[in-house]
Amino acid sequence: PSHGPVYNDPALIVDAYQKWISPRLKNEVVLPYISMHGSTLLMVNRLTDALVRLGVTVHPFDLSVTDIGKLATTLVDAATIIVGTPTVHVGPHPAVIYAATLAGMLRPKLKYAGVMASYGWSSKAIEQVAGAIANLKPEIVGTVQCKGLPTAATMAEIDALAAAVHKAHAADPNVLA
């Protein structure tokens, strides 16, 4: 038919739609990022380790090699997105803007968000990424920004971001453990 395939087992489709409209979320963080000089990668690795220690599943996506369809699929049931970006001419890396804009257009049911950014001389990356995902209307659980390589203070901020994500997930009755 012109409107798509006919399914002999309509429960497959009905069950999928019920899952999609359910308020239930997984205790997961989707972490799209790109790193140009290593600073953002260090931040992503620290956040990933901290979240895993707290029992939160993390799906890091290196946008320089990621299949964007896999990223979109992973966003469907995740409770949180945290975007990691270096700064390119005051703003986020173009691949990050693309991924954040895509997430904003897809409008997954996630409830929480955060942004991590590194920069050399000036940055509006956090504000621009937050603007790209504003359509999702997430609660921003935290942001971390560092100049150059992350310092011990930056790593402490990343640990605090992980703790804030864990706390938000634990307090939300719709986030499944």
Image: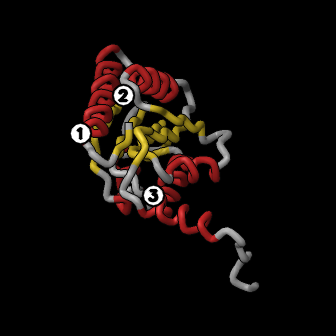
Instruction: Locate residue 75, reporting x and y percent.
Output: 50, 50
Question: On screen, 14 above or below 94?
Answer: below
The secondary element bearing badge 1 is classed as helix
Q: Residue at the spot x=28%, y=36% of the render?
A: 170
Q: Quadrant of residue 65?
A: top right
Residue wearing tag 2 = 146
The C terminus is located in which quarter? Answer: top left
- The Cα atoms of the two marked residues, 3 and 1, are separated by 20 Å
Q: Are marks 3 and 1 in contact (CB under 8 Å)?
A: no
Question: Disc 3 or disc 1, which is closer to the eye?
Answer: 1
Percent from the top left, x then y, of residue 66?
65, 42
Q: Which residue is mark 3?
A: 108
Instruction: Name the residue tied to disc 1.
Output: 171
Q: CA distance from mark 2 to mark 3?
A: 29 Å
Q: Is residue 78 visible?
A: yes
Out of 35 and 163, give the one closest to the viewer: 163
Where residue 3 sits, quadrant-wise, is bottom right
Amino acid type, label 3: Pro
**Of 93 and 79, the residue lying toward us:** 79
Q: Nearer the viewer, residue 135 or 128?
A: 135
Residue 153 x/y as whole percent: 29, 18
Looking at the image, residue 150 sits to the left or right of residue 139; the answer is right
Bin the neighbour count of mark 1 within 10 Å (Cα to Cα): few under 14, some 14-19, many 20 and up.
few
- Above or below: residue 58 compared with residue 67: above
User: Nearer the N terminus, badge 2 or badge 3?
Assistant: 3
Mark 1 or 2, nearer chain start: 2
Check whether the beta carbons of the residues at disc 1 and disc 2 lie within 8 A of each other.
no
